[in-house]
Image: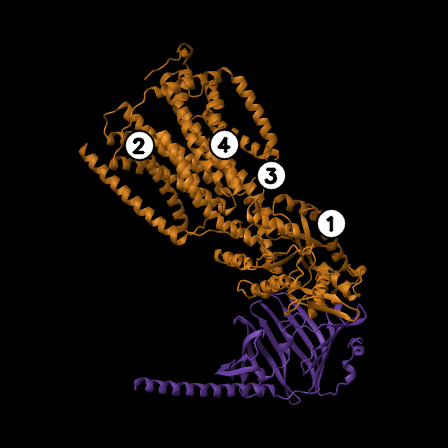
Amino acid sequence: MKTKKMLLLLTVFFSLYSIQQVKSQQTGLQIMQKVYDLPTPKDMQAELTMTLTNKQGEKRVRKLSQFISNDGNMEKKIMFFISPADVKGTSFMNWSYNTEKDDDQWIYLPALKRTKRISSGSKGDYFMGSDFTYDDLGDRHPNEDNHKLLREEILKGKACYVVESTPKASGHMYAKTITWVLKDKSIGLKRDFYDANGKLLKTLEMKKYENINGYLTVLETEMKNVQRNHATVISLANVKVNQGIAGSKFTERSMTMGR
Amino acid sequence: MKQIEKKLAIASWITMVMLILGTIYFVREMKNNAHMETDLDEYMPKTHPAFVYSDQAEEWFNINDGILIAIENPQGIYNTESLSKIKDISIKLQEMSQFDENDVMSLYTADNIVGSEDGMDVQPFFGDSPLVGGMLDSLRNNVKSNDMVFGRMVSTDETVALIVASMEDDAFTDDFYNEIMTFAKSYEDGQDKIYVAGRPIIEGTLGQLGPEDMKRMVPIVMLVISLVLLVLLRSFRATFMTLSSVLISTIWAFGLMAAVGVPIYSVSTMMPVMLIAIGVAYGIYFYNHLNKFFVSNPYASNIEAVLHTVKVLWKPLTMAAFTTMIGFFSLLTSEVYPIKFFGLFTAFGIFMAYVLALVFLPATILIIGNKKRKIKINDDVETYTLMNRITDKLLANKKIVYLSLAVILVVSVVGIQKVWINSSFLEKFEPTSEIAITDGFVNQKFGGTSTLNVILESDDYDAFKQPENLVLVDALQTETEQLMKVGNSFSLADYIKRMNKVMNADDESFYSIPESSEMIAQYLLLYEMSGDPENLVKVVNYDYNKLNVTFQLKGDDSKTINEALAVIDSFKTKFDENGIQVKYAGSGYKALIFSDLILEGQIKSIIMSMVLVFLLLVVMFRNLKAGLIGSIPIVVTALISFGVMGLSDIALSTTTALLSSIAIGIGVDYAIHFLQNYKVYVRKTDSRHDAIHETMKHTGSAIFSNALVVIAGFLVMLFSVFPPNRMLGLLVSMNMFTSFVGTLSIMMILVYTTKVFLRKGVVNEKQKKFKRKNN
């Protein structure tokens, strides 16, 4: 009799527990879906400054002008180096597909006067020696992870949801990420990345954002690799959206023009 | 008398109890706190400018020593199984918490920068799927045509592949050593042989063998010393007590080390043997005097005997102990911490042995009693005649003695020129030991297991994007690689050359530094975009004004490193013209600086102990002449010792550097005993002839038995697994012998001829013929 009661109690307990789980997962997913669904412009151009700081405190500052267009199926991006002087005119183009297809990448080196294809490597590769991987820079579909709302808390005076995302597929470079999402704007304020061993690897912080022509645009982010003691700040200036950038901007010929 | 008896008995028991409690305390300290220090960096003074700079450069460029795992397959490594082992080992190492992903380098993790008409690719050499058939051939061709891996990750004969896992020194523990050895060896089978080498492994092996060696040597030295003691003391009880006292002093010395948190360094593993060999001499003195008293007073009580013995013994024993301690204290002048600590704690152990001889041994007599032994009268007569004959012969042939000494000294001075210092940690091992064989194998197949880092610094930003500077770096590498013992080198220039070739359709004629700095800058940017930028961190800083050029050397000894440095230094003026400074870093270079410190410390401690011993002699005898004469045997001993080292190619190392101070400290005892007794006799007889014969008879034989014990003790070190320890044992034994012979020959003659201690106005000396005594 006693055992039966006990079993019943346990069953009730576990069903309640799973409901709780489902509920929080839905909420977590909903939050992340909202972030993902934020409207993005068809094209964008900006002046990008990338500042890398190593553990000795030495800095590498690069200025580029960047053009991006996205038609929903593929994202085309072209970047022209403005400084440092010895790489001025170097350009980099990336075509990223919504399908399984690997990215196509080209680089134009003015000193060599030739455009070369370069291997795209994997999504886990770091972008241009920065602390961002190609993956970090792109948007990850919420369906790829399990989400769990951990708590709600105030970060930098702003109310946030704290969501833990764990990849569904194994072998991902992060064991999990924890994201602080602004409650009222559905935009990520901070994200912690944990490595495959579950140790904190990197911290991403959004430093500045603005509403540009109706699009919430992040103007400055900082990614800190706490294990390597290395940091990258990417900031955008002169942002223009939906200017109708011509398709010819994203060609090998355009790359050789230097801007 | 009863009163004193009671008091002494109580004092004896208190002494015993205190000693036992103290010993228990120190044994517990040893058990709980003692640990072996194997991180070789810990052996070096942290504040020395060269080390400070090197540590800084190691931080800039992530320079760490690596564990090398080599897989050998005599049929060639390009087969499915061997390659999948390379992959498995690489992945498992990366998963270990001690390594970062970027710390592991192998054919599996390496970037293959390849070119085509179309562009440039940075690819892995092989992926996760097993390699079969034609893929093996194409991999082989890819490796062969890539200088960045061929000869580095795969041997040029294609039978060995290398996996390098670099790690912070302090991440290495004894447990991890065992873990990595077991892990690597688990991949060994009939087909593939596995070798594990590299500096962390050398350190680990040292950490394992050191304490083992110590554990093995202590019983041997105990056995040998017991036998010698039994022969000299002819009593089991006295032998046992003497051994107990030296054991207690050894335990206290190690216990104190553990209690104050000083780790056991490889040199400290020699402490027990030394303390035992030196300490038993004090026990011998005690029992000799005790027995002597019983011989002349057969019916005396134990208390009388003990009181008398302590009374007559404490002065000469204090002198002997303190001069020996001075020898060890002089090691404190060394900047090398293990040597400093060795000196300090051995001195403490000797102090304990000295205290125990005056406190513990008397207490045992009072508590347990003394075994009366048969008195042999004829003993002394024989010694007497023998010593008499020797003395007369020597005095009659002074010129021959002087001449032969002169010849020996000249030869020694020639030999001293040849003394060289070896800071090699590898050469602490037997050439036939596994670690030495493995290291030799990896050295033969690859660039080398030791590294030397050349750090180039300029004040100008982007200095190392300038072609003229990189061309110079390339020339530096090429010329240094000409040396036999320099395997290969690696720098930013290698990346640039490889990319220049690849970006020009793999045309070999482009394997060079391009002519424009823009081209170099753009190649570097290209590499950052397509390769792993962490790789560049190891060769150049962010401002492109600090460069790390790594040379692989096939040895960590001073000769090899100095040869490389000589070539590199010859480029200094050229670099200087371009505003670039040449500096050095890395474990190989630190080892070299370390060896200079050893030499410096050696010279300092010799001068220090000589001066102190000389002063002590002058003060003790209140006689300048006595100080000078007394110093002669040890000066001669030191000269001969270094001469022999030079002539027989024995290098100075952290181990053998201890030699001269030890030799001076123990050797001077003989001179002190001799002079002390001679002074007493000469004052008594007013005849230097009588006095010298008396001294030779009594003190000569006492010195002989002391030398015998110490030599026997140190010869035990011949059983050590470490060749330098064996050398040290041999050299100390030799030094004891030269001190002994020197004191009884040249010093004896000088004492006689200089008429030291002889009162002025004593003229009737010649008439006082030497009389034979038969008591």
Whole-angstrom CA distance, mark 2 to mark 3, is 46 Å
- Chain under numbered label 1: B
Residue A194 shows up from this direction = yes
Question: Which residue corresponds to mark 2?
Answer: B310
Residue at the spot of label 3: B420
Q: Tag 1, which secondary structure?
A: helix
How far is mark 1 from mark 3, CA to CA? Answer: 26 Å
Is disc 4 placed on a helix, strand or loop?
helix
Inter-mark Cα distance, 4 to 2: 30 Å
Display colour for chain B: orange
At label 2, the amino acid type is Val
SS under mark 2: helix
Q: Is residue B607 above or below residue A259?
A: above
User: Which residue is at the far bottom?
Assistant: A214
Question: How many numbered marks, from 0 up?
Answer: 4
Q: Chain of mark 3?
A: B
Local packing at callout 2 (Cα closer than 10 Å; few below 14, some 14-19, many 20+) is: some
List x then y, in percent, for residue B165: 59, 60
What's the residue type where badge 1 is placed? Glu
Chain A drawn colour? purple
Q: Are marks 3 and 4 on the same chain?
A: yes
Q: Quick one: B700 or B435, which is closer to the camera?
A: B435
Residue at left offset 56%, top offset 74%: A174
Task: Please tell me in which quadrant of the rendered image residue B307 appears.
Answer: top left
Q: Chain of mark 4?
A: B
Q: Amino acid at mark 4?
A: Asn
* Circle 4 residue: B735
Q: Nearer the viewer, mark 4 or mark 2?
A: 4
Amino acid type for the residue under numbered disc 3: Trp
Q: From the image, tell me which residue sits under label 1.
A: B479
**The numbered mark 2 sits on a residue in which chain?**
B
Looking at marks 1 and 2 on the same chain, the residue that comes earlier in the sequence is marked by 2
